[in-house]
Image (cartoon, rainbow, N blue to C red):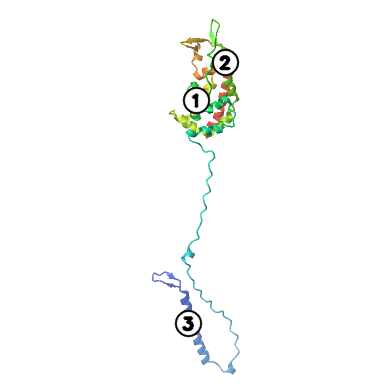
Amino acid sequence: MTENSSGTPQQPNTTASSRVLLIGAGLIAAVIGAAVFINRPSPADIQPEPSPPLVSPPPTAIELIPASDEQLDAPEVIAPSDPPIEPIENPLPMLEESDDPVRDALGEIPMGTIGQQYLIPSNIIERSASLIYLTSKGDVPYKLLPVARPAKPFSISDDGTQVVADASGFARYDALAQWLESLDLGTILLSLQPFLPLFREAWSYYGEPPEDFDFAVVIALDLIASTPSVDTTEARLIKKEAVWIYEDPSIEGLAPIQKQVLRMGPENAAVVKSKADEAQALWRQQIMATP
């Protein structure tokens, strides 16, 4: 091994070294041959000499041929293709395009005539958010309900000493109570759960935080469920201008939605309150408990 001018060791040139070695070996062989010829003994003095050991010839130098640039290039690595993107099943529609998806989600659930009538008009989610908004304020959302006001006027009974509600008028609400009692609220709620972000969006149109919709539902249902049990056939009525009001301020001071429940009669009111309790429990369990 030699060193270059900088003192760094260099590998010898294999071909040149081999040639020098062969020339040197030839010169040494010629010198030895001449000496043997000059000083060779007479035939009588010649003793048989053992055969010299066989010496393998020096290996032939192999010239290294540098690889071409193409050979030095690393093999092309083919990156695995990205897995195909699975389509999202039933992506959430835009609010203004949500009517048909909502109808489809509820299509297999028995909704009764009243329920079907509620789903026919457009803007189902927006109307529902408005219904929750008004009810949570204690109002009765007459215009948003698919139930017309009873055609018959509010029935009263006047015995000459007091005016009370006439029990015969409670029958006007029997169909509504029976319809509520027939609803499978758990299945309906699960079917509507994917649309909850759209309900919150519609709720925000009232200037309320979207997440407050969840609590507004609880407030609306609690107002209905907490309606006191009052037999209105025993609660005296007094006339104020053109309408009858309850003489007892604890009854008259109730929210309009609660007084409407009372006007349905004790039996129908019990059904409505029970359904409100059930809906509130399901809502807390299925919606508000969801992270």
Q: Residue 109, percent across and down?
A: 59, 30
Q: Amino acid at mark 3?
A: Ile
Q: Amino acid at mark 2?
A: Phe
| In-front residue for pair 186/115 | 115
Q: Which residue is mark 3?
A: 23
- Residue 144 shows in the view: yes
Name the outermost residue toward the top.
160
Q: Which residue is mark 1?
A: 131
Q: Residues within 10 Å of mark 2 (few under 14, many from 20)?
A: some
Lower position in the chain sequence, tag 3 or tag 2 = 3
Mark pair 2, 1: CA separation: 24 Å
Residue 155 is marked as: none
Closer to the eye: label 3 or 2: 2
In 3D space, how far apart are the residues under numbered discs 3 and 2 (Cα atoms)?
Answer: 131 Å
**Residue 179's spot in the image, x, y percent?**
58, 23
N-term mark: 2 or 1: 1
Which residue matches tag 2?
A: 170
Q: Position of residue 181 (x, y in %)?
A: 59, 23
Kindly identify the amino acid type of the residue bearing the numbered disc 1.
Leu
Q: Nearer the viewer, residue 106 or 134?
A: 106
Q: Quadrant of residue 86?
A: top right
Secondary structure state at the residue bearing disc 3: helix
